[in-house]
Image: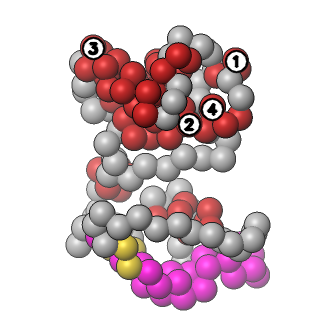
Amino acid sequence: MISVKNLSKHFGDLAVLKDVNVEIKKGEVIAVIGPSGTGKSTLLRCLNLLEEPEGGEIIIDDVNLLDKKTNVFKLRQKMGMVFQSFNLFSHLMVIENIMLGPVDLLKMNRQDAFDEGMKLLAMVGLAEKAYAYPDELSGGQKQRVAIARTLAMKP
């Protein structure tokens, strides 16, 4: 479960997040929607501490993320985030982009990572692009590869 209480974040004098409260139960799917510049990305970046909030609490699975003793790296492994720029490695094929995290971080063997990557590519409708490079894909295809790569980490 994720619980956010009174979360605040400022950029200079601009209060991007002010006393935000939300509770997300395990298995629940939510959408954060709103106009450009209203703090959606900042909220998500605060949830995995890519941005440090000035106030409030973030509790994930009964662990206070803002406690200095918390192993943030371990908690980040439970989260998945697809960035607007996708951050695909242009020198790696699509399947290699998907396999990289599971092999290097989860210590999955390469064959299992390949098999899982191919399943995920099929799930997002891109199995035929496994051996393409990111520069050969459309923006929408890159986004689907980024989603598959995130899911490969089993967040």
Q: Residues within 10 Å of mark 3 (few under 14, many from 20)?
A: few
Q: What residue type is labelled 2?
A: Arg
Mark 4, secondary structure of its residue: helix
Question: Magenta part of the protein: which range?
Answer: 1-22
Residue 130 seen by the camera = yes
Q: Is residue 2 magenta?
A: yes
Mark 2, secondary structure of its residue: helix
Q: Residues within 10 Å of mark 2 (few under 14, many from 20)?
A: many
Task: For the residues labelled 1 and 2, say whether their Cβ atoms are less than 8 Å apart.
Answer: no
Q: Which amino acid does label 3 sit on?
A: Gln
Q: Residues within 10 Å of mark 4 (few under 14, many from 20)?
A: many
Vertically, is 3 above or below 73?
below
Q: Residues within 10 Å of mark 1 (few under 14, many from 20)?
A: few
Q: In which quarter of the image is residue 28?
A: bottom left
Mark-to-mark CA distance, 1 and 3: 25 Å
Mark-to-mark CA distance, 4 and 2: 5 Å
Residue denoted by label 3 = 111
Residue visible at 38% across and 79% down?
23
Residue denoted by label 4 = 142
Residue denoted by label 2 = 144
Residue visible at 75% across and 80% down?
14
